[in-house]
Structures are given as C-alpha cells and as structure tokens.
Amino acid sequence: MYLDLFRLKELPFRLSPDPQFLYLSKHHARAKAYMESTVWFTDGFVVLTGEIGSGKTTLVETFLHELDKDVVVAQINQTQVSPIAFLQSVLVQFGFAPFKMRKAELLATLTQFLVEQYAAGRKVLLVVDEAQNLSNRVLEEIRLLSGVETTKDKTLRIILAGQPELLAKLNSPELVQLAQRIRLRFHLTPLAKNDVYAYIDHRLQVAGADGRTIFSEDAKMLVARYTGGIPRLINTLCDTSMMGAFAIEKDHVDAADVQNAVDELQWVEYGTPTNRLPIVQVGLPVLRHVSPETVLGRVWVTTEGRTVAEKELRPGRTIIGRTPENDMQIDSKYVSRHHCQLTVTADGTLLEDLNSTNGIYMQGRRVRRHLLADGDVIQIGRHELHYTDERHVRTRPGVEATAVAVDPAATGPQEALNAPRVSPGT
C-alpha cells in the first residue's frame, strides 16, 4: 500500500467506523452531547438521524467507546425483525439465552433485569442503529420497555439512530404515543466546506502525517465539490486519490490526482442535476395507491450457481451491502459496506450505486443508476443480483396470471418515477 511513500502509520481514509478518526464538527459535537445526555436523563428517547454516509455509525461507536463502566449497553443493528426476535436480541446483548422463551417470559426477564441493574446502581442503555427499518409493532414494544420504572426513575435509556425516513415514521399517527416521549431530536447534515478541509487534515494527522501537508488546497477544494461534505464519500475519494498518486510515486496529492480519481470513479459534482433521477417513463400500470405491504418485486443473490440471499421488495428503499445492518447482506470482500440501493415505488424499481469501490454492472457495462426491468441480472463483485417485477400481469407457461390490485381512484396520466438520490453513510 501507500503508507511508506506518504510516511503514515495506518490508512487514513478507511470506511470502517473507527472512533479514533472521528472528526467532531460543531454539528457532530452537538449530536454527541445529545447522546451523552441520555445517560444522565431517563425521561424520554433521543433520536439521531442523517443521510447514509453522514457519520452516524462512527459517532455512535465513539459515544459507546467512551461510556463509563457502570453503563450496561445493548446495541442492536439488525432491525428487520419481528417484535419477539427484537426482544430476544436485546436479551442476548444482556447475556441471556432467550430463544425458547415466550413473549411473556421475554418481557418478564427484561423487566426483572432492568430493575436489578437499577438497584445495583448501574445505568442501562439501549441503542438501536438503522432504526428506520423497525416496524411499528417493534417501535411499540420499545415504547412499552421505556415505561419500566421504579417509584422514582425509569430504568432504561434509549437512543434511536437512523436515516431520515425514521422521522417520518415517528411522526405518523400510529406512533403518536412514542413521538410524545422523544425528548431530543437531531439531524446530522453534511460537512461545510471548511469542515471538509479540516476533516481531511484531521484524519491524516491521526494516521501519522506529523504536520506534513499531503493534500493541496486545490485538491481539498475538489474533494469538497465532488462529495458534498458526506464523510464516506470524502474517504472514498481521498483514498482513491492517494492510490493514484502512489502509482506514479508522488508523496502528495494535488488537484490532478483528485480529478483522475473522480474520472476513475465516474462521479459527477455532488448536487448537480445529473445526481438526481431524471424523469423516466416507466411503462408500467399506474399503481400510485398501494399498501406499504404490497410486494412489487423480488430479488435474489447467487454466486457459483447457488442462491445465498433473497428478498421481497415492497414500497421504499432497500440497501444492499457487505455488513449486517444492510437490508440485504452480501458477505464478500468485493462488496462495499453500503454498495447499492433499490428504490421501489408504485411505478418502478430504480437501482443506484452508492459510490461503491467495485461498482455495479449490467451486461458487462458499469452503471451508476438503472431502472430495472423484469428479468434483469446485475453483477455485484462476484455475485449476481436477479430481479423480477410483480407489478403487471404475467402469463408464463404453467403459471397462473396474477396482478397487483390497483386503486380504482388512481387514474390519469402515468407519473414519472422521481425519487431523490441518497448518498452513502460511514
């Protein structure tokens, strides 16, 4: 690698959420202070949101790393679970083996544990990451757990962290009781231009730069322009730029190296119109009014002729990547932590690359975004993602024709698919 050439002790722009490399902008410092307040106050939830790549996971890991020993923590990252599976996951974090327990036993065990910890002078904290994927039923279980209390105090502190969809979910009429218990909400925004510069310098110093200038001002300016201040994108672009400089034996990175990296990654300037989904006629029936539970498509992942994962697609967003917190996991070193996403609407399914290292390919050609058609096969590293569309009537040999129910009121001209682009998170 390039460590020797740049005289660094470790890689400065890894995508893993290492607390040692956390850069605390004013915004991130305030979010961290909100989480810290949870340890001292037990009168409600703290909700932290931010786009993919905004630094939520690194911030949470840093916060947990700095907790006192008298704080007992349950950290939940897998959130597409049933209420019983969620309660079991919490108990497992607390050292129990609850897999044969019924729901009443799960709740009784949790309640007894919380009361015992309170009596022993210990604080209990539940941190749920990727909380936007929690069902309303699981969120209701969390609300009920927050009500476990002694005569003086509540016994459980709760932090919910997730993408912006979490706020919309918490504001829904079905969860009004939960929303009333939220004491603090904070939304992480991208880094400002000056913070991007400071972020790059900070990570290089932690990695052993020792005050040396490795990225020129022009190089930092280009990084800010093409990443929009999203920490994960900054890491990806800076690392690729350093690899490019290393290839020609340069011990510094200038604007030309960053531009070469941009070209190699096939990026465009962050926030330009080309970063948004263009108006596309989908060619499908208008299904604007569909239930959130309606299955609109299916995907399955294969490698070497065997299926390793499959998922039904309902309205919303599905994140695919290497780590367990994704909606669909592909455990491979050729797959980025958050590799790509599927945005499913009534009118179509859009596949988007989340600025992954190795990209996504259709018929041997790398694509940034692609409106999927029934039968499409997408190459992700050494795996293939197969897609079938369930929106329209299909008649196949030996298969009965089926259709998705359409609201009779949903008439009029076909709407274009116009979902916002989502940037990846750290």
Image (cartoon, rainbow, N blue to C red):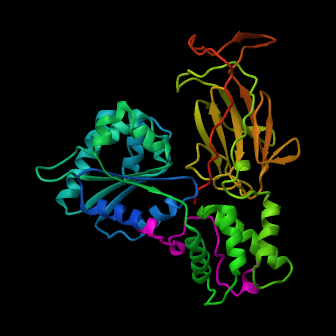
Q: Please determine whether, in this image, residue 212 is positioned above or below residue 148.
A: below
| Residue at (38, 48) in percent of width and height | 90
Q: Please determine whether, in this image, residue 226 is positioned above or below residue 25.
A: above
Tell me where residue 363 sits by quadrant.
top right
Q: Please determine whether, in this image, residue 418 is positioned above or below residue 12.
A: above
Residue 151 visible from this viewpoint: yes
Q: Residue furthest left?
A: 151
Tell me where residue 336 sits by quadrant.
bottom right
What is the span of residues highlighted in magenta in the rendered image? 1-29
Residue 308 or 11: which is nearer the viewer? 11
Residue 256 or 106: which is nearer the viewer? 256
Location of residue 185 in the rendering, given as x and y in whole percent from the top left corner: 37, 52
Quadrant of image for the C terminus: bottom right
Location of residue 96 in the rendering, given as x and y in whole percent from the top left corner: 36, 50
Q: Is residue 10 magenta?
A: yes
Q: Please determine whether, in this image, residue 190 is positioned above or below residue 301.
A: below
- For this view, does 234 lie left or right of residue 119? right
Location of residue 189 in the rendering, given as x and y in whole percent from the top left corner: 51, 58
Count numbered badges in the picture.
0
Q: Is residue 13 magenta?
A: yes
Report the magenta stretch's main SS: loop
Quadrant of image for the N terminus: bottom right
Residue 102 visible from this viewpoint: no
Residue 353 or 258: which is nearer the viewer? 258
Location of residue 414 in the rendering, given as x and y in whole percent from the top left corner: 69, 22
| Residue at (78, 10) in percent of width and height | 398
| Residue at (49, 41) in percent of width and height | 133
- For this view, does 288 lie left or right of residue 163? right
